[in-house]
């Protein structure tokens, strides 16, 4: 079994919907049940990747299968690794937490468990990099929450995360990375997504059609996900990598393609 990780870095807001809701958000995004982190279902990824080929061609059948036969490519769900949050200094930060980092270490096989265990965090603390642009008078302020900058993120961990994605914006990670507690990360991942209002205008009256106003939740741009890709044959992953390269390492996921949502930079990374 060969394995690689597919990184997905959102260039525009992303909406992979969970259906209608009776809450304040009419159209929420899909989330993990236990953490409330946004997630990209493997079925959504499979459909988007399969569309990179012409239907019925040999590679499409071999990788993704048919009604009668399973494909050779095994896809995992897109898991959250880093989440962008507004910062009082430095514009915005990418937040990670021990849980998302340990998941990535487990799935990628990189040896960074010691560097993660060094991060001693409480709900009021944050760890930043040596050259961070987020610190203001010893504090880091995300949204309306001031945190004490009490720890440093190991340079080896920063370098490993920087290599996950080739997007030009992600190259700013060394000055924007901040590691917070699992609890605080979960709070921001649930409550700091974008909420867009949608309406439909009546052509005759020029006003909103009755019942045609709804709120849609979107994962913000500059969010980093990754998904595990596995195959029993190494050339299956090579075929996927070649097709991604031919497509400019760009994928569109989720809803509202025609209004610019869901465009992601994609990269396959080797595992240890």
Image (cartoon, grey):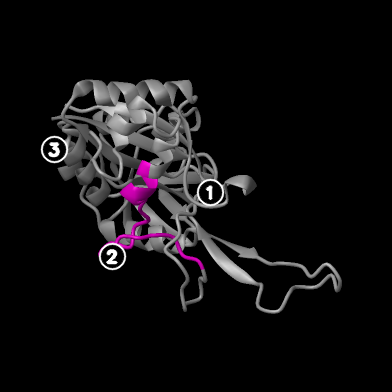
Query: In the displayed structure, does residue 253 sit left or right of residue 210?
Result: left
> Nearest the camera: 63 or 41?
63
Q: Where residue 72 sits in the image (x, y, percent)?
A: 23, 33
Q: Earlier in the sequence, mark 1 or mark 3?
A: 1
Query: In the displayed structure, does residue 211 sit left or right of residue 72?
Result: right
Give the alpha-carbon distance from disc 3 to disc 2, as whole Å: 29 Å
Mark 2 closeness class: few <14, some 14–19, many ≥20 residues within 10 Å: few
Q: Main secondary structure of the magenta part?
A: loop
Query: In the displayed structure, does residue 220 sit left or right of residue 81?
Result: right
What residue range appears in magenta? Answer: 27-46
Q: For numbered disc 1, what is the local secondary structure?
A: loop
Look at the picture and state if 76 lies above or below 16: above
Give the alpha-carbon distance from disc 1 to disc 2, as whole Å: 22 Å
For the point 46% across and 21% down, the residue is 246
Give the alpha-carbon distance from disc 1 to disc 3, as whole Å: 34 Å
**Quadrant the C terminus occupies:** top left
Residue sitting at the far right: 204
> Nearest the camera: 141 or 81?
81
Residue 39: mark: none
> Which residue position holds label 1?
13
Tell me if label 1 and label 3 are in contact, CB under 8 Å: no
Can see residue 135? no
Look at the picture and state if 138 lies above or below 201: above
Q: Where residue 257 sits in the image (x, y, percent)?
A: 57, 46
Please check the rendered image and state whether residue 5 is part of the magenta-colored stretch, yes or no. Answer: no
Q: Where residue 168 sits in the image (x, y, percent)?
A: 49, 27
> Which residue position holds label 3?
114
């Amino acid at each position: 079994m060969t394995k690689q990780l597919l990184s997905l870095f959102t260039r525009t807001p992303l909406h992979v919907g969970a259906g209608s809701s009776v809450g304040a958000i009419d159209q929420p995004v899909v989330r993990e049940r236990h953490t409330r982190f946004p997630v990209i279902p493997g079925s959504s990824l499979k459909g988007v990747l399969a569309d990179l080929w012409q239907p019925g061609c040999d590679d499409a059948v071999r990788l993704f299968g048919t009604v009668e036969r399973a494909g050779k490519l095994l896809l995992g769900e897109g898991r959250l690794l880093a989440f962008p949050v507004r910062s009082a200094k430095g514009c915005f930060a990418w937040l990670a937490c021990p849980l998302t980092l340990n998941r990535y270490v487990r799935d990628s096989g990189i040896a960074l468990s010691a560097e993660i265990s060094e991060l001693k965090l409480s709900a009021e603390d944050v760890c930043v990099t040596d050259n961070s642009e987020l610190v203001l008078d010893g504090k880091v302020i995300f949204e309306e929450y001031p945190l004490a900058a009490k720890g440093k993120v190991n340079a080896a961990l920063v370098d490993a995360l920087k290599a996950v994605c080739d997007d030009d914006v992600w190259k700013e990670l060394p000055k924007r990375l901040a590691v917070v507690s699992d609890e605080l990360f979960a709070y921001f991942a649930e409550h700091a997504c974008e909420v867009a209002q949608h309406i439909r205008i009546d052509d005759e009256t020029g006003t909103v059609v009755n019942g045609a106003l709804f709120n849609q939740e979107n994962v913000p741009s500059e969010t980093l996900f990754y998904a595990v890709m596995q195959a029993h044959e190494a050339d299956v992953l090579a075929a996927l990598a070649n097709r991604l390269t031919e497509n400019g390492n760009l994928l569109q996921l989720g809803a509202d393609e025609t209004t610019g949502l869901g465009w992601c930079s994609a990269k396959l990374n080797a595992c240890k």
